[in-house]
Image (cartoon, rainbow, N blue to C red):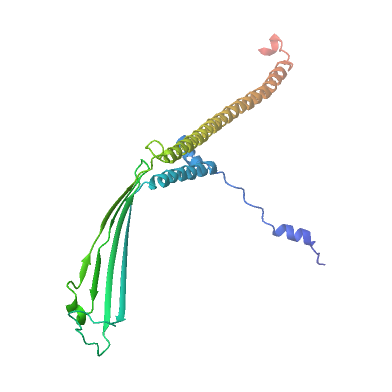
């Protein structure tokens, strides 16, 4: 006769109990613990990025006084039919359509800066080249013709934004904000380091306390074992002392 095994029992026999987790011990120094705490602390990361953004604000405010250079080029070509004679080129004959091909090349170089006193200095150089087609070139004295112009402009406000002590105000404000964020970042770092150091030594104290407690437990177990063994020894001695002695033989039996 075959017996049926209940499903719950068969399923329970197939279940493999989980293996016990092995304890992992790794020696970590106080410096390593502090470095790991600083690397994985979210407040430290936020404070670091905030401090870097304040440094960027200083660069942005200082960039307002940086010099700038711009270069622009222009090319213009115009072709028109002549409706009047050109001296030295067409004479007085206009029997056919003659075109006037003009080409203009212009280059502009501009450099500007803003000093700390609030003024502006601008230097601009603008060379140009003008030419016409070769069949009419004899009617022009210079072909191509070159022209150029140099301009220096200086503007200085007398009341508003005038003076070296006024214009760097935003730079100084950005530096103050950066210093405040740097101090806040340093405070957060020192707080985390102090907390890690305190927890580290508390852990060391707890582990040493466990060792002391284990040693005390071992000593107590040994003392308990000794105390339990003493009554047995005393009972054995008392039983040996309470045994009756055998009767002594008479003198004549001894011989």
Q: Is residue 50 toward the left or the right of residue 117 in the image? A: right
**Quadrant hosting residue 179:** top left
List x then y, in percent, for residue 19: 62, 51
Residue at point 21% right, 67% down?
Answer: 146
In the rendered image, which quarter contains the C terminus?
A: top right
Q: Which residue is the extreme one toward the front?
A: 92
* Residue lying farthest to the right in this orientation: 1
Position of the N terminus, as image quadrant, is bottom right
Residue 28 in sight here: no
The location of residue 98, given as percent across then percent down, is 26, 85
Outermost residue on the top side: it is 251
Name the residue nearer the viewer: 68 or 149.
Answer: 149
Residue 38 visible:
yes
Q: Is residue 149 positioned above or below 170 on the image?
A: below
In depth, the one of 45 and 139 nearer the eye is: 139
Numbered marks: total: 0
At 28% from the left and 66% from the top, the residue drawn is 106
95 and 47: which is toward the camera: 95
**Vertical comparison of 98 with 36: above or below:** below
Name the side, left or right, on which 91 lies relative to 192.
Answer: left
| Quarter of the view holding residue 92 | bottom left
x and y percentages locating residue 174 in the rendered image = 45, 40
Residue at 20% in and 72% down: 144
Q: Is residue 32 above or below residue 102?
A: above
- Does residue 80 appear to the left or right of 21 in the view shown? left
30 and 219: which is toward the camera:
30
Q: Position of residue 236 (x, y in %)?
A: 69, 21
């Amino acid at each position: 006769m075959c017996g049926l095994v209940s499903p719950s029992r068969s399923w329970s026999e197939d279940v493999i109990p989980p293996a016990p987790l092995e304890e992992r011990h790794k020696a970590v120094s106080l410096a390593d613990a502090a470095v790991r705490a600083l690397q994985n602390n979210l407040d430290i990361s936020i404070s670091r990025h905030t401090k870097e953004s304040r440094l960027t604000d200083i660069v942005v405010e200082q960039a307002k006084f940086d010099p700038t250079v711009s270069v622009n080029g222009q090319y213009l070509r115009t072709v028109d039919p002549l409706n009047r004679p050109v001296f030295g080129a067409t004479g007085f004959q206009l029997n056919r359509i003659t075109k006037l091909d003009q080409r203009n090349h212009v280059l502009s170089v501009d450099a500007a800066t803003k000093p700390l006193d609030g003024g502006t200095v601008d230097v601009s150089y603008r060379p140009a080249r003008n030419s016409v087609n070769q069949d009419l070139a004899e009617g022009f004295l210079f072909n191509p013709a070159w022209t150029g112009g140099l301009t220096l402009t200086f503007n200085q406000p007398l009341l508003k934004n005038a003076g070296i002590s006024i214009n760097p105000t935003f730079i100084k404000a950005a530096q103050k904000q950066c210093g405040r964020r740097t101090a806040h970042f340093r405070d957060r770092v020192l707080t985390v380091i102090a907390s890690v150091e305190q927890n580290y030594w508390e852990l060391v104290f707890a582990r040493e306390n466990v060792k002391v407690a284990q040693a005390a437990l071992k000593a107590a177990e040994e003392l308990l074992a000794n105390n339990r063994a003493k009554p047995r020894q005393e009972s054995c001695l008392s039983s040996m002392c309470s045994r009756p002695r055998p009767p002594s033989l008479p003198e004549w039996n001894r011989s």
